[in-house]
Image (spheres, rainbow, N blue to C red):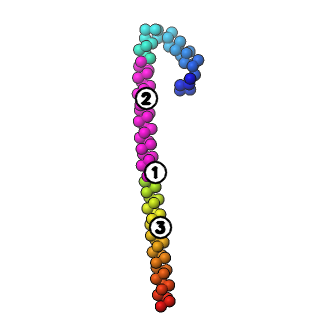
Amino acid sequence: MNVFGIGLPEMALIFVIALLVFGPKKLPEIGRTLGKTLKSFQAASNEFQEEIKKETDKIEKSVTMQARLEESEAEKAEKVEVEEANAETSSTEA
């Protein structure tokens, strides 16, 4: 088991030290407070990650749309050039 880079032996040592420092009566209260704090931190972290993902998705869609628009404009410009070249060829032959 590995939480925050801390293995089971390290967690046991931390628990024993906390038990000695705070005592058995205060330890459950500290555990609850720590649990609530970690849960709150995790919720904020998840919210932040979701917001970042939404923003990157928006940027990705915008870039994709811009690329398609530029591609479409290039195709239109190419068609106009071909039509103009055909018109010049037709007028030269006549």
Type of amino acid under label 3: Ala
| Magenta stretch: helix, strand or loop mostly | helix
Residue at image location 43% in from the left, 8% down from the top? 25
Regarding mark 2 in the picture, which secondary structure is present there? helix
**Dot in front, 1 or 2:** 1
Q: Earlier in the sequence, mark 2 or mark 3?
A: 2
Residue 44 in the image: above or below residue 9: below
Q: Nearer the viewer, residue 84 or 36?
A: 84
Q: Position of residue 47 (x, y in %)?
A: 41, 36
Q: Is residue 17 magenta?
A: no
Residue 35 in the image: above or below residue 72: above
Q: Which residue is mark 2?
A: 41
Residue at image location 57% in from the left, 19% down from the top? 8
Q: Which residue is mark 1?
A: 60
Structural crowding at the residue carrying mark 2, measured as other residues with C-alpha within 10 Å and reported as few (<14), some (14–19) or many (≥20): few
Residue 45 in the image: above or below residue 35: below
Q: Which residue is mark 3?
A: 74
CA–CA distance between discs 1 and 2? 28 Å
